[in-house]
Image: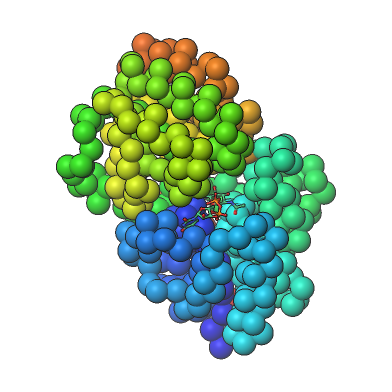
Amino acid sequence: MSFNIHIIAGARPNFMKIAPLWHALSSQKWCTPKIIHTGQHYDVSMSGSFFEDLGMPTPQYALNVGSGSHAVQTANIMIAYEEICLKDTPDLVIVVGDVNSTIACALVTKKLGIILAHLEAGLRSGDRTMPEEINRLATDAISDVLWTPSPDANENLHNEGIPDEKVEFVGNIMIDSFEMQRNAIDAIQHDNIKFLPEAYAAVTLHRPSNVDGRENLQIILSSLLEVAKSIPLVFPLHPRTRGNLEKYGFLDQLNHDNIQLIDPMPYRSFMSLVKNSRLVITDSGGIQEETSHLGIPCLTLRDNTERPITISQGTNQLVKVENLIKCVSQCLTHHKSKSVANIKFWDGKTAQRIAENIQQRFDL
Ligand code: UD1
């Protein structure tokens, strides 16, 4: 019987991680990969458009759990996924990244005694106030197979006492998605973007630490308004951020000739927006990696990163909001040409390495 593999995805940053894996595994005779969508993200702009852009089929199972507090969301995913697991009896469950869907399905998997693999294992920000850090620590602690994107992740796992034989450095799966879609991304025409390529900064913000508190959000908006005096901004609004801007009555402040607010974009359009930008201001995890791969300067509005290789070998810089204007101006003066990072195994072949690893580990 073919090896039954569940690939779990729930939130936007998961979809570009599972797509290359699904493509690599669905062409193999020795396994049957199935996509399980938890429904943590459900808007077309946060979910459906990614399936379409990344060439993925309708998920075999959709749990449709939706939003909620951390406890409600995690618990609802667990309850719904346990039923699927009991019915479909996977041989291997693959969870990716660090969202609530990741830890919820990881717990269900292990408690049913099923083999669990974590893709993008070992990343650590060292900041346990981040919900994602708790998800990373807990998922890695119970995983049987841990696929890492960079050597720092192997080191973190080793230091936490995870046996080396469980861990495999496979590279960065998101780069596979980008390289699979590179031609389509290059072909995108941005008729609705007001500013010329290389003449704007792309902005994305959604971390609770930046956008949930009124005072913090106001400080960030004031900085962005200052930055907009030196470079126009294109700002796709995450639902969490839009919700808070509306709640605090801040949306009008961003009504500015040099700021374009847009809805969340599908994968290819967004990557094209980033590729054509002069610089990026973000608090996302994945965008720190994508900008390094593309050689676009990235100013990350966070105190720490779980992706230190994007600083040591890429284009990323951690920035405190009070220094944002100075850092943007430094970028505009000094970063004249793109310097593409050449990080080991960020090469578009990670999914292939994972497929080989599964075959070898389970003698398939
Ligand atoms: C989640 C992840 C975060 C990831 C981010 C990417 C966790 C703990 N957090 O945060 O790591 O970086 O996704 O987006 O898993 N909403 C919609 N439509 C949707 C989804 C959400 O309107 O399709 C709104 C809801 O009001 C919801 C809020 O956005 O309450 C936040 O969604 P949620 O999934 O709880 O967290 P994110 O901030 O998206």
Q: Nearer the viewer, residue 257 or 48?
A: 257
Classify 272 as above or below 227. below
Classify 60 as above or below 49. below
Q: Nearer the viewer, residue 95 or 210?
A: 210
Q: How is the image coloured?
A: rainbow
Residue 17, x across and y down, in percent: 48, 56
Q: Quadrant of the N terminus?
A: bottom right
* Rendered residue at 56%/69% (across/down): 65
* Rendered residue at 62%/87% (across/down): 87
Instruction: Classify residue 195 as left or right of residue 240.
Output: left
Query: Could you tell me how many numbered marks the image carries?
Result: 0
* Rendered residue at 72%/67% (across/down): 107
Instruction: Classify residue 293 as left or right of residue 147.
Output: left
Classify 220 as above or below 344. above
Residue 68, x across and y down, in percent: 61, 60
Q: Residue furthest right?
A: 161
Residue 147 seen from this side: no
Q: Residue furthest front?
A: 249
* Rendered residue at 40%/13% (across/down): 329
Instruction: Classify residue 153 as left or right of residue 287.
Output: right
Q: In which quarter of the image is the C terminus?
A: bottom right
